[in-house]
Image (cartoon, rainbow, N blue to C red):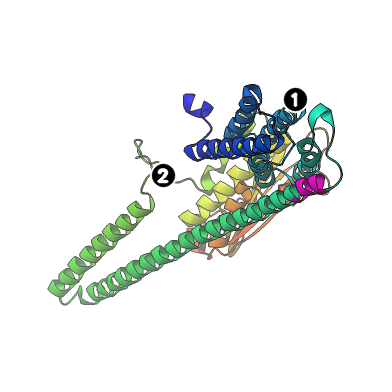
Amino acid sequence: MRAERLTWTRNDALVAVGAAAVDLTGFAFDTQFEGAPLGVPAAFLVVAAALALLARRRHPVVTLAVVLVLGAVVNVATSVGPHFGLTPAVALYSVAVASRIPVVVCAALVTPPLAGLGQGGRLLDPGAGLLANTAATLLVTTTGLVARRWQAEAEARRALLAERAVADERRRIARELHDIVAHHITTMQLMAGGARANLAHDPETAREALVTLEESGRMALGEMRQLLDVLRAGEEPETAVPAPQPGAADLERIVAESRATGSDTELVVSGPARPLPPTVGLTVFRVVQEALTNARKHAGNAPARVRLTYGADEVAVEVCDEGPADGAARRPHRGGGYGLIGMRERVALHGGTLEAAPREEGGFRVAVRLPVPSAPEETIHPQREELRR
């Protein structure tokens, strides 16, 4: 908490001290020419205005207001001619760098007249003095806006370079994984074929091939684990025993959980069900899980329906909800939320298609199609054409 209160840095302190020194020096020269000493109270106000710059990063508008008010008090209470000092210039620059454009425009319009107040509350004559204040305000504001744009472009360049570095590293790791898997699995396939061909008439050769096959598999697994450990570096170690990844057979569980939260959720399975590849089954499960989560988040306890369809060479899953009870249409964020982005990445990985959009009759619909090679010999429950749970 103490660190949060100390919002200024050493550079901020140096800027405040420098501004106080420059402004005091300027007032000192003015008093010599005009023969009117500045006085201790006025000097204290000048220093206080400079010290207000310590808060310019977190509260730039408030800092500028304090600086202008204290400067106006000094100008009104003394006979020293008003001038545009370094302290208001730094405060105005901070506003131009950190605030919105309308706020910057208002600050630029207010600064010249407040900085031009003279003794007795009189404004400077609309001549060289007020013109100089206006020119200084425009110069400082323009400099701040230019610096602001430069900082934004620099930040965008840094983010782009970081994303490019991450993408390059991912491509490198993917290439290494591909090389490892391609090399060792090719060797394993050749050794397995050689062992099968020599198993009957040359068992010794078959045994050597199987030994080479085992070593290649162990080496491939070790190298892949090493690369995956690099990818997971910095993560907290897992203490629980990893559970098997869910699949399409676990949709009943996720639908039951949705019902337990109060949403009337229905699961419909069409077509002859068959075992899916583990990655495809996991994708189906995650899509349904994310879609039902979004339905509860945006549509409350509105009824939802999950339809899983097994085709000859594909599997399709559709999740629809009826929308909020008040009839308001749910619209996803521009470009989709993180959940939809994750769905698209999973589906694109398998060469499938995803549709996610509001329904005309209300609610939201998520539909996914994933290509799956047909395997009639693995088909189970062929008699089930339509099963409702």
Q: What element carries label 1?
A: helix
Q: What stretch is highlighted in magenta?
A: 128-135
The percent coordinates of residue 53 (x first, y second) are: 60, 35
Q: Can residue 290 be seen in this view?
A: yes
Q: Which of marks 1 and 2 is in front?
A: 1
Residue lying at 24% horizontally and 66% vertically, measured from the top left = 216
In the picture, measured across the screen, residue 65 lies left or right of residue 200, that is right
Residue lying at 28% horizontally and 73% vertically, measured from the top left = 187
Residue indicated by mark 2:
244
Q: Nearer the viewer, residue 130 or 369?
A: 130
The amino acid type found where label 2 is placed reads Pro
The percent coordinates of residue 304 (x first, y second) are: 70, 40
Residue indicated by mark 1:
77
Using the numbered discs, state the Cα–Cα distance from disc 1 to disc 2 in whole angstroms.
80 Å
Mark before the other along the chain sequence, 1 or 2: 1
Relative vertical location of residue 159 with respect to residue 115 in this rendering, above or below:
below
Q: Which of 177 and 62 is in front in this view?
A: 62
Q: Nearer the viewer, residue 185 or 8?
A: 8
Q: Is residue 276 visible?
A: no
